[in-house]
Image (tube, grey):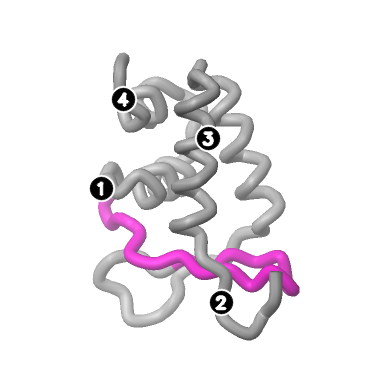
């Protein structure tokens, strides 16, 4: 396996939830679930992640930011990434899981 998308693909992780598969796809710019995630925003002060599915007008779900970060890091541990790949995966997560303006970091 030579790409981050291959190493983090849900097919490699039988215990991965559909929600986490959608998050991984969203972070990597892939569409591995139907519906895919269209938008993720974060309120750091509330420790909440708001998720909007493709084709939906409003936010469809909530998730703890702490739990999501922990799950992401556990996935990176299990995927056998190189240090460079891990930096890339963390950078993509931080870029794609955006903080809602005005909520602070």
Q: For the residues marked 4 and 3, what is the alpha-carbon distance in whole angstroms?
A: 13 Å
Please determine whether, in this image, residue 95 is positioned above or below residue 33.
below
Provide residue 32's location: percent of width, then percent of height.
28, 42
Q: Residue furthest bottom?
A: 102
The answer to which of 22 and 43 lies nearer the viewer is 43
- Mark 2 or mark 4: whose residue is earlier in sequence: 4
Q: Which residue is mark 2?
A: 100
Dot 2 or dot 3, earlier in sequence: 3
Q: Dot 3 corresponds to which residue?
A: 87
State the residue at coordinates (35%, 59%). Answer: 37
Q: Which residue is mark 1?
A: 31
Locate residue 16, reporting x and y percent. Answer: 49, 33
Tell me how far mark 1 sits from mark 3, CA to CA.
22 Å
Residue 50 magenta: yes
Real-space Cα separation, disc 2 to disc 4, in angstroms: 30 Å
Q: Residue furthest right?
A: 45
Kind of element beneath mark 2: loop
Q: Could you tell me how many numbered marks the image carries?
A: 4
Magenta stretch, residue numbers = 34-51
Where in the figure is residue 22, as x and y percent of width and height? Answer: 39, 48
Q: Secondary structure at mark 4?
A: loop
Q: Residue at x 64, y 72 (%)?
A: 43
User: In front of the other: label 2 or label 3?
Assistant: 3
Kindly identify which residue carries mark 4.
Answer: 3
In the depicted view, which residue is nearer to us: 93 or 58? Answer: 93
Question: What is the distance, in whole Å, between disc 2 and disc 3 at their CAs?
Answer: 23 Å
Magenta stretch, main secondary structure class: strand
């Amino acid at each position: 396996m030579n790409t981050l998308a291959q190493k983090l693909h849900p097919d490699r992780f039988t215990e991965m939830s559909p929600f986490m598969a959608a998050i991984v796809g969203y972070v990597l710019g892939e569409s591995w679930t139907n519906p895919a995630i269209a938008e993720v925003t974060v309120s750091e002060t509330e420790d909440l992640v708001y998720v909007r599915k493709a084709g939906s007008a409003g936010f469809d779900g909530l998730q703890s930011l702490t739990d999501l970060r922990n799950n992401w890091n556990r996935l990176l541990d299990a995927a056998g990434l190189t240090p460079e790949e891990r930096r890339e995966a963390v950078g993509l997560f931080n870029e794609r899981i955006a903080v809602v303006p005005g909520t602070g970091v």
